[in-house]
Amino acid sequence: MSKKNTAVPGRIAGFLGENSYIIVFVAIFIVYALTTNGLTWSGMMNVFRHSAVIGIIGLGMGLICITGEIDLSVGSMLALDGGFSVIIFNMTNSILLTFLFAVLFGAFCGLINGVMVGWIQMPAFIVTLATMLIYRSFAQYFCQHVDKALIGGGSSVYKMANSQSSYQTLYNFGNGKVSTIPIVGLILIIMTLVFVYITTSTKYGKKVYAVGSNMKGAQMAGINTAVVKISVFVIAGALVGIGAFLWIAMNASADPATTGNSYEMYAIAAAVLGGISMSGGKGKCLGILFGAMSYTIIDKIIVSLKMDSLINNAIKGIILLIVIMVQIVGPQIKQKFKKTE
């Protein structure tokens, strides 16, 4: 086969492997367009709104995965952070203090994971599996054992007290729009752009990729791999804190039993759909935005087709397997065509 004949298929395979997140998103969006009674601007903007929390958490998960690690605790962390943030709001009536607490407490929870993984060098899977259980348990325990006034008078749910003067302002922020675009969706886009810049144009971003690509090589190059690993868990925790703040702003409550349920899996899936390699060192943060929106659209397709919601995760799992297959097979085909040139 001539070089000309092999070059084109090789490039196509390479493109599919590197940009599978765009193809998956477009394919899912086309299905969504065909299954609805007609796309509306409001419907498309709702995709941004419903993707905001999982997308922001997914950015943190993507950063962790780039270093070759994983965090199973983000869903439980969201419930704990969201619940405690409600308490802070009810105590202070301050939106700013609530936001600062959510971010700092999330970063603290991430620091616990990071120290055990990066410094003590415990397996991330075991550490975050343990903290997943701990954070969820704490969220449920404190909801039952604190003064009911601190949780808005709720019995099993943390509720923002609507008697507070800042209640409506915070709720309007979580559900507000700027020129028909949801505020929380804009925050997701801004956060994505920030992390695209961090991972592609800063020394820190290069260190993160270096640790994930070859940790021994990174150590020989003078990179403190323990500090880098701790830092990505702290950043991921802070992003969970932002997600928790947006969650309570949108819902005015946090249920310790259901808030963030399976979000660790969705965040990992959004990162993988976005092209992040679970083995570390590869992937683009921009893809996480498309990955998160893809999963949101799948939910909407299932609703529009009036399918049983119990099949939801099965469909997401199948799509995830297909995407991973494309990511693995694409480069292999590209390499095969290179050899025949």
Image (tube, rainbow, N blue to C red):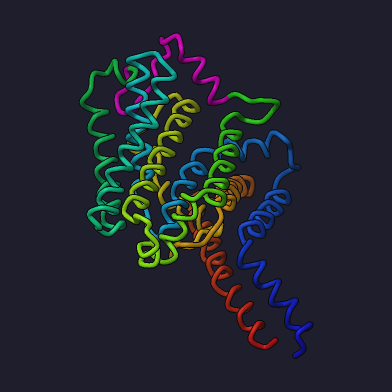
Which corner quadrant holds the C terminus? bottom right
Residue 96 appears in the rendering: yes
Q: Is residue 293 above or below residue 171?
A: below
| Relative side of 98 to 169, left or right | left
Q: Which of 151 and 114 is in front in this view?
A: 114
**Which residue is at 40% across, 26% downward?**
100
Q: Which region shows up in magenta?
A: 153-175
Q: Quadrant of residue 259?
A: top left
Residue 295 appears in the rendering: no
| Relative side of 120 to 97, left or right | left
Question: Residue 131 at what x, y percent from top left?
Answer: 27, 46
Which corner quadrant holds the N terminus? bottom right
Q: Which of 10 and 72 is in front in this view?
A: 10
Question: Residue 273 at what x, y percent from top left?
Answer: 55, 57
| Relative side of 326 to 141, left or right | right
Indicate whether residue 168 is drawn in magenta.
yes
**Which residue is at 38% across, 57% downward?**
223
Q: In this view, does 323 lie above or below 262?
A: below
Q: Residue furthest left?
A: 145
**Which residue is at 34% across, 21% downward?**
88
Indicate whether residue 157 is drawn in magenta.
yes
Total of numbered circles in the picture? 0
Q: Residue furthest bottom?
A: 1
Q: Which of 229 and 272 is in front in this view?
A: 229
Question: Residue 222 at what x, y percent from top left?
Answer: 37, 59
Question: Residue 318 at what x, y percent from top left?
Answer: 53, 63
**Which residue is at 45% across, 9% downward?**
165
